[in-house]
Amino acid sequence: MAEEAGKASGIEKFDGTDFAYWRMQIEDYLYGRKLHLPLLGTKPESMKAEEWALLDRQVLGVIRLTLSRSVAHNVVKEKTTTDLMKALSGMYEKPSANNKVHLMKKLFNLKMAENASVAQHLNKFNTITNQLSSVEIDFDDEIRALIVLASLPNSWEAMRMAVSNSTGKEKLKYNDIRDLILAEEIRRRDAGETSGSGSALNLETRGRGNNRNSNQGRSNSRNSNRNRSKSRSGQQVQCWNCGKTGHFKRQCKSPKKKNEDDSANAITEEVQDALLLAVDSPLDDWVLDSGASFHTTPHREIIQNYVAGDFGKVYLADGSALDVVGLGDVRISLPNGSVWLLENVRHIPDLRRNLISVGQLDDEGHAILFVGGTWKVTKGARVLARGKKTSTLYMTSCPRDTIAVTDASTDTSLWHRRLGHMSEKGMKMLLSKGKLPELKSIDFDMCESCILGKQKKVSFLKIGKTPKAEKLELVHTDLWEPSPVASLGGSRYYITFIDDSSRKVWVYFLKNKSDVFVTFKKWKAMVETETGLKVKCLRSDNGGEYIDGGFSEYYATQGIRMEKTIPGTP
């Protein structure tokens, strides 16, 4: 079972999102290993109670290993498998109005982006509809089909209208629509069509060869997008190798020109409609490229929020293919100290260059200005990044020690400590202002350091401190001992008597501890003669000098009541 628990850690940990998917994973895992009986909650008659309790506890441990720390703390008190699953279902699958509204909003806002993968888009759609089903909201087959059609981008309008007009009075079926749009994606890919134009060819080969003039080379983002959006048939395309029309350079059978620059290789993306450029230069710098359709990097270690997967291939001019194995975000530290966040950066391990796509920046609403050997990227009135022209490339130099290389932490307790043990209210305020983008919510356990650092000592209640009305009714006494250095008179001790009523103090110096009893009798005789009153109560700290040496018998004969307190108190 220990080995099984270790394997279960391979299941994606449940962090509070997509409960239905996590439950499917854990149920499949337990059923596959015949450990599912505790999920049903009923003990088989043939199984002993001890065996059932052990099996239930083992399965409980396996499930706990698949929970994130923030989720596990919410169910730490659950001691059986069925109680644990019921608690999780009640918290994360409860069909509350807020949960339903949130999921419906996600569904209606779902929109497939241009050039996005249809399979990924359908996965998102199915995830949301499954979550809605778990909160008792189901759609019939035709509604699901219509929602998928409505979520397609504008470039699919012709296909959407054709499907709608061809069905007549028959109801649409989700599986049919799914198969149609997947087939359409394959057709467009094979035909070399962009998502932005129904029949336009997309696979333009862009490079920086010596045979290209300035108008064909690097352009600003507006010219780049305008050139990409032109609809061109195969007859209108001119080959940049032989100069003839009707085919692309990559399809040209003529010998390759000798004067072509071999230090820059044009890359065309045939699977995902993407265009890239690979150049030989230092790997710590980034190149702004108007011929790249998306940001790329060969360095996995600088990518945050990394998502691994098969994101297609790119092809070099020599026919070799490079795999796109993941994507994520990259924070670039610029020489002026500012940080520039690039989103949706593709990871291509075999690429030789970090590339910033001018086209992607323009699609995201940025403005790119090239002037006087410098470049600048702005969004509104805000300047996001700037740099200088190096040789023939517009580049930005990034110091190696300033590029972010670690994934952002989503541990609330860790951020609580990083922020100097900030209060929960303060962290929620930062989260609401977008200052903690890595966190989804503020939820951390009791902080022991905060408790120890902020607790206060409760003061003693002011009870029983009213002074006595009559003198000598209560007298406090104590012996201080011994001094490491004797006084000039040879004394190492002193004894005090304090009247509780008048707060008058008498101090006597003693050479020996045994002189306490004799000194007390002298003091008693003096004060009783002066005041005409009797000492009624003597309070000490229970020291032995007030018990031995004749004190006890003297109290009894003189009618004095002796009170004892713990050391260090009045």
Image: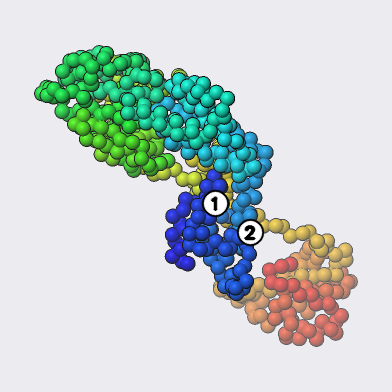
Q: Tell me where residue 483 appears, x and y as whole percent.
A: 59, 73
Q: Is residue 120 left or right of residue 290?
A: right
Residue type at the position of mark 2: Asp
Q: Nearer the viewer, residue 337 or 510?
A: 337
Q: Is residue 86 above or below residue 199?
A: below
State yes or no: discs 1 and 2 in contact (Cβ < 8 Å): no
- In the image, residue 200 above or below residue 414: above
- Give the residue type at disc 1: Arg
Residue at 83% x, 61% y is 466
Crowdedness near tag 1: few (<14), some (14–19) or many (≥20) residues, C-alpha within 10 Å? some
Q: How is the image coloured?
A: rainbow
Which mark is on residue 176? none
Which residue is pictured at 28% across the width and 22% down the height?
Answer: 204
Quarter of the image where one finds residue 499? bottom right
Identify the residue shown where x is 85% and y is 84%: 557
Q: CA distance from mark 1 to mark 2?
A: 14 Å
The residue pinned by badge 1 equals 23
Q: Residue at x 79, y 70 (%)?
A: 475
Residue corresponding to mark 2: 83
Q: Give the mark, 1 or 2, whose residue is nearer the N terminus.
A: 1
Quadrant of image for the C terminus:
bottom right
Q: Nearer the viewer, mark 1 or mark 2?
A: 1
Q: Measuring from the top left, give residue 92's x and y in whole percent.
A: 60, 47
| Residue 510 sits in quarter | bottom right
User: Alpha-carbon neighbours of circle 2 within 10 Å: few (<14), some, or many (≥20)?
Assistant: some
Q: Secondary structure at mark 2?
A: helix
Give above or below for 38 relative to 392: below
